[in-house]
Amino acid sequence: MQREPDGGTRARTAAHYAALADHYDTNWTHSESFLSWMADEIVSVLGLGPADRLADVGSGTGLFARRIAASGQVALPVVCIDPSAAMLAQIPVGPELLPVEASAERLAGLDGALVPEPAGGPFDAILVKEAIHHVAPADRRRVLAGLADRLTHEGRLLVVMLPTRIDYPLFDAALSLFTALQPDPEAIARGMRDAGLEVSLTYHQTELRIPRERYLAMVADRYMSLLSEFDDPTLAAGVDEIVAAHPEDVYAFPDRFAFVLGTRTEQRPRFSSPSAPHSPPRSPSCSAPASAGSSPARCVPTSKPASGGATTSPGDAGRSERCEETG
Ligand SMILES: C[S@@+](CC[C@H](N)C(=O)[O-])C[C@H]1O[C@@H](n2cnc3c(N)ncnc32)[C@H](O)[C@@H]1O
């Protein structure tokens, strides 16, 4: 039986994704350039190669796993691990992706027996994209340590997540609640370090351009799990608030992601303690050590824009930047 350490949060999360699953992809497939940009960033930061075994934990519908699989930069199948049967049911059937119904906690060994091999690893790379916030705060460090234990020597664990503040055209109550609930990427980085991984934290940014009506429909559809915290009348009032604040036809806003990368090294103890020593992590894309504090980030345009140039079609990802901690 699954633990419910969080007063039913897990059950609410499951209900949210069960309701969203069959149109989850529709909310995003209008923005193919965003999907390819994100998949390319993941392949690049994980340093994936054709022999690497990859698990996508919290894979959802495999929106990114299928693009990574198609890149040729990974061994097949990519193991897609998610506790939502409804989300996994959207994964295309084929040899490229292996759906596994399990949580991050279970893969990490917190929820009973480990998923057996090959689904249980070891993996050369583990991706957790926009799912770490679904792990209860009290469990996060142990989950990160458990996932680190599923890595091969020199294996990489990449957590892709939003920062605690987002510049989305949402209503104020949603933005405030997001900031209250969203884990801090610095805390995830610390958890990985405590698990004995060498860690870098970089920020990657692109611009989304979404026609107003489509974006409002996405909000009404509760495209973010956060929006499931609001009842129907509050959400409807929130949509009105957005319209009043943003009369423009196309909403253009930055989408900024923290990429927290942990690399397993030879020195890493198998079961690390929070006090385990670690060497200063270095970013794969810059020479500055990732800081433990709130250092400013430096943003530089990537050489390859998300859509191969300036955005012209609504919904495309536009200008892209990589923002590196400057220490
Ligand atoms: C925002 S979606 C992200 C899906 C996919 N990674 C993407 O970026 O399109 C979050 C996913 O995390 C899954 N999830 C919820 N709780 C989880 C847990 N405890 N462990 C792993 N995944 C979880 C949900 O079922 C959902 O598919």
Image (cartoon, rainbow, N blue to C red):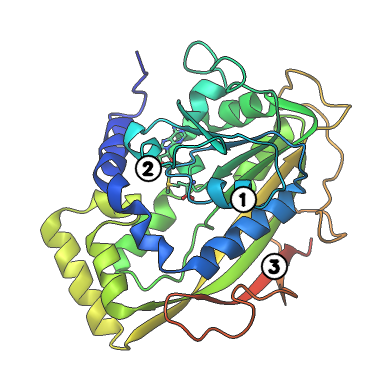
Question: Which callout, 1 or 3, points to the residue nearer the camera?
Answer: 1
Q: Residues within 10 Å of mark 2 (few under 14, many from 20)?
A: some
Q: Are marks 2 and 1 in contact (CB under 8 Å)?
A: no
Q: What's the distance in space between the residues labelled 2 and 1, CA to CA?
A: 17 Å
Question: Which callout, 3 or 2, points to the residue nearer the camera?
Answer: 2
User: In the visual, does 178 lie left or right of 154?
Assistant: left
User: In the visual, does 165 lie left or right of 14?
Assistant: right
Q: Amino acid at mark 1?
A: Ala
> Foreground: 2 or 127?
127
**Residue 291: x, y in percent?**
75, 54
Q: Which residue is mark 2?
A: 90
Q: Amino acid at mark 3?
A: Cys
- What count of labels does the image hold? 3
Q: Earlier in the sequence, mark 3 or mark 2?
A: 2
User: In the visual, does 198 lie left or right of 208?
Assistant: right
Residue 323 numbered tag: 3
**Residue 306: x, y in percent?**
61, 72
Q: Residue at x 32, y 88 (%)?
A: 248
Q: Residues within 10 Å of mark 3 (few under 14, many from 20)?
A: many
Q: Earlier in the sequence, mark 2 or mark 1?
A: 1
> Foreground: 310 or 168?
310
261 above or below 166?
above
**Residue 165: x, y in percent?**
48, 63
Q: Secondary structure at mark 2?
A: loop
Q: What's the distance in space between the residues labelled 3 and 2, CA to CA?
A: 33 Å
> Foreground: 230 or 264?
264
Q: What's the distance in space between the residues labelled 1 and 3, CA to CA?
A: 27 Å
